[in-house]
Amino acid sequence: MSNVFLEEYFTIVLFLFIALVLSCGFIILNYFFSPKSPDPEKLSPYECGFEPFNDSRMEFDVRFYLVAILFIIFDLEIAFLFPWAISLGKIGIFGFTSMMIFLSILTIGFIYEWKKGALDWE
């Protein structure tokens, strides 16, 4: 029983062993051959506008979170539009009106956010 079990799963165990050896080898090679002094451009503020190596307990502007949440909301909207567009011929008028209701609710939310100034970057 034990030999049959090992013979059937030998390729999987071999694959996992090779994957482990390769990943550890690549990490070690990267450690030894990577540049040790970072470029000044890498140490400059990126998209968030803060210096990268300051105190982690500093005050954070809420607008960064608002932009991230808005991006996720409208990214999900696009993710829902692709399957809807592909299956539009099968779902008929009911699917079309359902998606138009969904899009109108999102459009109302977008207009509300726009009027509240959540999209303004001062």
Image (cartoon, rainbow, N blue to C red):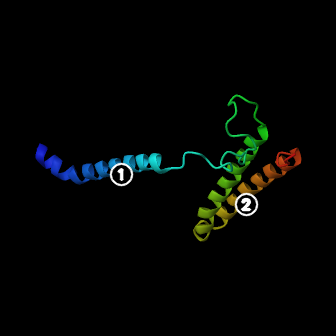
How far across and how far down the image is residue 17, in percent?
29, 48
Location of mark 1 (residue): 22
Quarter location, residue 104: bottom right
Type of the residue with mark 2: Met
**Could you tell me the amino acid type at mark 1?**
Leu
How many numbered circles does the render carry? 2
- Sequence-wise, which precedes: disc 1 or disc 2? 1
Residue 117 in the image: above or below residue 85: above
Helix, strand or loop status at disc 1: helix
Q: Which mark is residue 100?
A: 2
Residue that appears at 36% across and 51% down = 22
Residue 67, position in %: x, y?
A: 75, 46
Residue plotted at (57% across, 68% down): 90
Q: CA distance from mark 1 to mark 2?
A: 50 Å
Place of residue 37 in the rendered image (x, y in percent of width and height, measured from the top left): 59, 45
Per the image, label 2 sits on a secondary structure element best described as: helix
Q: Nearer the viewer, residue 28 or 115?
A: 28
Q: Nearer the viewer, residue 35 or 82?
A: 35
Q: Quadrant of residue 43?
A: top right
The relative height of residue 57 versus residue 43 in the rendered view (above or below) is above
